[in-house]
Amino acid sequence: MKPLVSVYITTHNRAERLILAINSVLMQTYQNIEIIVSDDGSKDNTKAVVSNLMKQYHNIRYTRNDESRGANHARNKALAMAKGEFITGLDDDDLFTPTRVAFFVLNWDDEYSFICDNFVNSKKLEMKPHYEKTTNHIITLSEMLFCNMASNQIFTKTSRLKKINGFNENLRRLQDWDCWLRMVVEYGNAMRFNEKSYIMHHDELIRVSKSISSLEAYKALVKVNPELFPPMKDDFINKYILKTVPIKYCDCFIYSSLWELQRIIVVIQQKIQKKLARKFDSDSI
C-alpha cells in the first residue's frame, strides 16, 4: 500500500489564493494524501471556503485559531494533527506541480534527513542562477550553517519533524532555515534534487527582498543555535553585515544566503580598492 503523505497548508486571510493552493494538491498524480489546512485566525471567508471543499473531498482537514498566533504555531498545530508517514508543506499563496509528491515518494531514501528540490517564481518561472541546483546535490551540515540550501519546503518523515519539535515559535523569520538545520543535525545529510516542483508566488519574493529586518532575523537564528554558530556570532554580524554592507544589498537574504552575502562583501571591497587606486593615481599626477 502506498504511504500516506500529509500536506500542511498554513493560511491567514488569503481565501482566494488558498483555493488555488489546495487545488494544486488535489491535482497531484499521487493520490494517498491528506491535506491539513491550519488557519491562523483568518477574518475573511477562509472557513467557509474550506468547509465547502471538505464536503467534496474527504481528505481535507481543517483547524483554526480564533486569533492569529503566527505561522510557526499554525505549522506546529498541523504537524500535531498529521497522520501521514511522510509530511511536506505548502504556503497558501504557492502551488505544487502535479508530480511533486509522487516524485518525492518514489525517490525517498532513509539515508537522508529530508529531500527537497528547486522552486520557481510564478511570475517569471525562473530562479536566480546562483541558487538553482542543476544537478542533484547532497546538503551537508556545513552548507546548512552557511545558508538555507533546502529552500522553503522539504519532504520528510512525519516522525522526524515531530521529534525535533517542529518549528521554533520564537522566531519571526528564517524559521524554515532553523528547522531544516536542526533536521540535518539530528538525522544527517539531506538531498536536493534538480527538479522544479514548487511554484512560489512572486509577491512573496518582492516582500522579502524589500525587508530590512533580515539582519535581525539572522541574529535571532544565531542566538537560538549558539552551539552551531560560534564562528559567526556578533563579531561577524557587526563587522560585516551591520557596518560594511549597505541596506540596498540586503536582498541577498531572499535566500538566507551567507554565501551570497560574502560575495557581495568581496565586490564592495574590490570597488573600494579601485576607488583608492584611482585616487592615488590622480594625487600622483
Image (cartoon, rainbow, N blue to C red):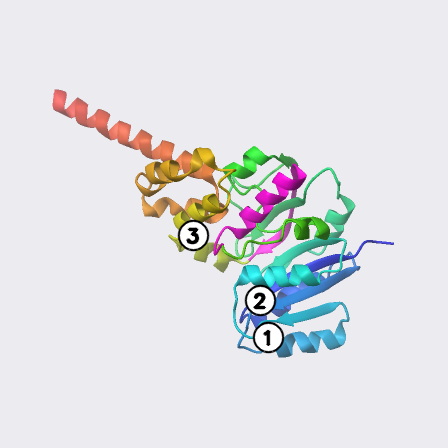
Which sits earlier in the primary sequence, circle 3 or circle 2? 2
In the image, which disc is placed on residue 11? 2
Which residue shows up at 58% across the image and 78% down it?
A: 45
Q: Please rate how many residues cluster around mark 3, counting C-alpha atoms within 10 Å: few if below 14, some from 14 to 19, many from 20.
A: some
Q: Is residue 9 magenta?
A: no
- Using residue 269 as the reference point, say whether residue 60 is left or right of it: right
Q: Compute the Cα span from label 3 to label 1.
A: 28 Å
Q: Are marks 1 and 2 in contact (CB under 8 Å)?
A: yes
Residue 117 position by quadrant:
top right
Q: Which residue is mark 1?
A: 46
Which disc is residue 134 wearing? none
For label 2, count other residues whose C-alpha is less than 10 Å away and answer few (under 14), some (14-19) or many (20+).
many
Which three-letter amino acid code belongs to the residue tagged 2?
Answer: Thr
The spot of residue 95 in percent (x, y) is: 62, 59
Gap between marks 1 and 2, in whole Å? 8 Å
**Mark 3 or mark 2, which is nearer to you?**
2
Q: Secondary structure at mark 3?
A: helix
Q: Tell me if residue 126 can be seen.
A: no
**Range shown magenta:** 171-200
Task: Give how far across and how far down residue 94 sits, in percent.
Answer: 59, 59
State which tag comes first along the sequence, 1 or 2: 2
Tag 2's secondary structure?
strand
Give the secondary structure at mark 1. Answer: helix
Q: How many marks?
A: 3
Position of residue 54 measured from the top left corner of the image (x, y, whole percent): 72, 74
Image: 119 above or below 207: above
Which of the two residues, 218 or 12, is positioned nearer the viewer here? 218
Q: Is residue 153 above or below residue 20?
A: above
Residue 250 shown left or right of residue 170 in the figure: left
Camera-side residue: 199 or 9? 9
On the image, numbered disc 3 is attached to which residue? 209
Tell whether position 180 is magenta: yes
